[in-house]
Image (tube, rainbow, N blue to C red):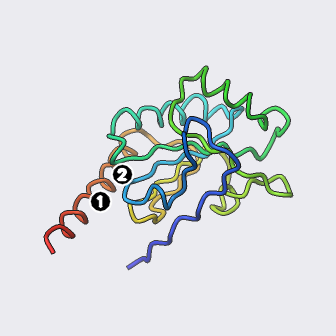
Amino acid sequence: MTRLRPAPEWQIAEWLNSDCELSLSTLRGRTVAALAFQMLCPGCVTHALPQLQRLRAAFPEQDLAVVGLHTVFEHHEAQGRRDVLAAFLHENRIRFPVGIDSPGTDGVPLTFRAYAMQGTPTLLLIDSGGRLRMQKFGHIDDLPLGAGVATLIAETGAIDDLRAAT
């Protein structure tokens, strides 16, 4: 049996679309769908971010936390400004929380490095216990993603039922 590893904690410089700082520990108890993206990434803009918005609409917030991680590893001058990201989120009607990945001294963001990401978009699915269940670089179809999210949410419900019965 494969042992699931805890998801590395995010290292976020600032949050947009959130009244408070988020962390995996504050989201414990819910399934988390997090998308590492860049504003100038065509796959992020045309596919991954709209897909995350569909996830947000499809599942109740108490079951699924949807989070964006703006992780800039190239074109820092064009993408690295908070006001530009805030305008991008507003124009694209992205309302879920978005964390700005803390920059590393070598230009590689810290959360990006902690997950050994290959690029953007990268989708992370984290279960209610804080374990990384899926990390996918590139495109994933809606149907398998929705099934994976539903499975993780159902696992959470089964665990809650078991706890209540004991």
The x and y percentages for residue 39 are 69, 33
Residue depicted at x 68% and y 38%: 38
Residue 91 location, quadrant? top right
The residue under label 1 is: 156
Residue depicted at x 61% and y 37%: 16
Q: In what quadrant of the picture does the N terminus appear? A: bottom left
Position of residue 161 in the picture relative to residue 120 (left or right): left
Q: Residue furthest bottom?
A: 1
How far is the residue under mark 1 from the one under mark 2? 13 Å
The x and y percentages for residue 140 are 48, 43
Specify the label residue 148 is tagged with: 2
Q: Residue furthest left?
A: 165
Of residues 155 and 82, the one nearer the viewer is: 82
Q: Amino acid at mark 1?
A: Thr
The x and y percentages for residue 112 are 68, 55
Crowd class of label 2 (few under 14; some 14 to 19; many from 20; radius 10 Å): some
Specify the label residue 73 is tagged with: none
Q: Amino acid at mark 2?
A: Gly
Q: Residue furthest front?
A: 19
Helix, strand or loop at label 2? It is helix
Give the mark, 1 or 2, whose residue is nearer the N terminus: 2
Q: Is residue 19 above or below residue 105?
A: above
Helix, strand or loop at label 1? It is helix
The x and y percentages for residue 32 are 44, 52
